[in-house]
Amino acid sequence: MTAVRRPIHERPRWWDEANDRAMLICRISDRKQKDGVSLEAQDHHGREYADRVGLRAIIAKPFQESAKKSQLRAEFHAAIDEARRQKIKHLIFYVWDRITRNFTDAEMLEEMIRDGEIVVHIASGGTVLHADSDDSEFFLFDINVAQAKQDNRNRRRKTIDGMEQRCRNGWYPSRTPSFYAQAPVLDEQGRPKRRGGTVVGPTEEGRRLVRREMELHLKGFSLERIRRKCVADGLVPARYLATYTATQIDKHLKNIFYAAIPNPHPDPERPNETYRSQFVWRGNWYEGKHEPIFSAAEWERLKESFGQKATQRVLKHQGLFAEGPLTLTCAADGCGCKVTYAPKTKPSGVTYHYYRCADGRYVHRGNGQPQVNVKEQDILDQVAGAADAIEITSAFAEALARALNETHRAATEAKKKSAEVYRAEIRALEEKDDRLFDRFDSGEIDRATYDRQLSRLRTDKSDRFEKLRDVDTEGDTAYLDTARDVLELAKQAKSLLESRSREEKRDFLARLVCNPRLDGRTTRFDLKKPFAVIAKMRVANDWRPQRESNPSPRIRTSARSCFIL
């Protein structure tokens, strides 16, 4: 149908002679409406309106989308963006609530209208919002948006009320879990009613699969092993194979919908009442009438099994040496696995703290070795031996401090002498540079010779400056402060350790040792560098550094380097 053009004197204020193109935006909220004619009706009335007012409806945008939240309206915003790109000025909606039910989109559209980007048309009532519209017309727009928003609230409340009543009646109100379905209630003539329904199921194949999953899980099978076993036995229906994962099995075994509750008084005359099942909807528990898959006793066993596993997953990370800088590894050849926390709780309630190799590489089991459990206190006592290894007397610490000071002074003097040597060499190179320029200026040498010799001089000078920067420092005393802290800690290591709690002892020992590992029942470790040096000095008679008869300009004694962290 061709759009009818009105005479110029009859055209409305919103008319734009240069742009008469329009977009029809047709929206439905519910996917069930896709099977109806709502979109077709909106399209028909929109085109009829466009022809009546003289617009050309060049494109239609039908889609199914809620108008409740702006951030979820991808299709609506895509249509607006396309209208902008194609410079389509007129947007036609069938009724007000097809536009929006939130004020965020309403504010966006009003801004675009007032800026002259678009003109909004309501086909059912002939209302038009344009840049020259009165404020009262925008106020009417706001009222219609508010009314649509309130209508949405009322529908939502009524829907939830009806679904809650279905829950109280014992029927799950929405989409059922796998292997169940909603069945409509039939009237006296055998025709399905528009409202109400019952839950039917489980299917026989679903019952077999889920019960087999339960049996394997209670035998100790992992979820992945259960998946492989059920697939190999042909228990998984073909339509579920693509999505049948360990996660799906976990959901089956933890879904309260499949579980029964005890029913002491079954009534054979009322089969639906025979089943006493349960479900949770919107966070509330309800007693159901659908047929369960697990008995009440089986459900209790499943809950207990998952509860124990969940507790163990938490506990294995709560041991004293399970995480952090003192996390243990297995020292067995070819293993190197993490040592895990494996507490044992007796019926009396007493918990014994043990550690064992995770044996993730199957080294111990592959060699037929029994599992070795080591007490946490034994590990702590063995690592505490680090404090004995580094313990020194006050006299030893003072002697070592004096030796460090002497070494520092000797190093400082040597560096001063080296600095003077390098400064003298730099002055000599600068004088040579001046003489070279004089020879070039007098014509004694040509430009190429001058450039070559100048490049060599500058390389030599740069090398001397680099060496001077290395030695021309007198304030490098940070290592002395570190050494004093280390010596103080070594003097008091045992007394500090004895006065601390188990967790504080672990944190204190983490400052002394590294690379802890469990070799059978023996805990091995390495002392960190400064403490390892102290441990060696305790048993050595020649630890005191001696001055060389001809010290190098780049003096770096072992005593100093040992205490740089």
Image (cartoon, rainbow, N blue to C red):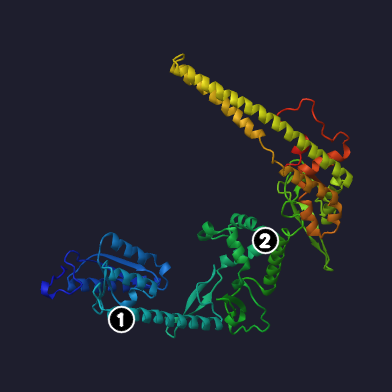
Q: Which residue is mark 2?
A: 216
Compared with 21, 164 (above or below) is below
Q: Quadrant of the N terminus?
A: bottom left
Q: What residue lies at 29% left-to-right and 62% top-to-bottom?
A: 84
- Relative depth, front residue between 281 and 442: 442
Which residue ends up furthest to the top in the rendered image? 444
Compared with 40, 272 (above or below) is below
- Relative depth, front residue between 130 and 92: 130
Residue 55 visible at all: yes
Mark 1 and mark 2 in contact? Answer it, CB < 8 Å: no
- Measuring from the top left, give residue 410's x and y in whole percent: 76, 34
Q: Quadrant of the C terminus?
A: top right
- Relative depth, front residue between 371 and 427: 427
Q: What residue lies at 56% left-to-right and 81% top-to-bottom?
A: 170
- Measuring from the top left, give residue 20's x and y in whole percent: 19, 66
Q: Report the number of numbered marks.
A: 2
Q: What residue lies at 80% left-to-right and 51% top-to-bottom?
A: 371
Closer mark to the observer between disc 1 and disc 2: 1
Residue 393 visible at all: no
Q: Where on the picture, by quarter, is residue 314?
A: bottom right
Amino acid identity at mark 1: Leu
Amino acid identity at mark 2: Leu
Q: Residues within 10 Å of mark 2 (few under 14, many from 20)?
A: some
Of callouts 1 and 2, the N-terminal one: 1
Drawn side of residue 95 relative to residue 365, left or right: left
Q: Which residue is mark 1?
A: 140
Q: For the residue labelled by badge 2, is the local secondary structure a helix, a strand or a loop?
A: helix
Q: Where on the picture, by quarter, is residue 555?
A: top right
Q: Residues within 10 Å of mark 1 (few under 14, many from 20)?
A: few
Q: What residue lies at 71% left-to-right and 44% top-to-bottom?
A: 478
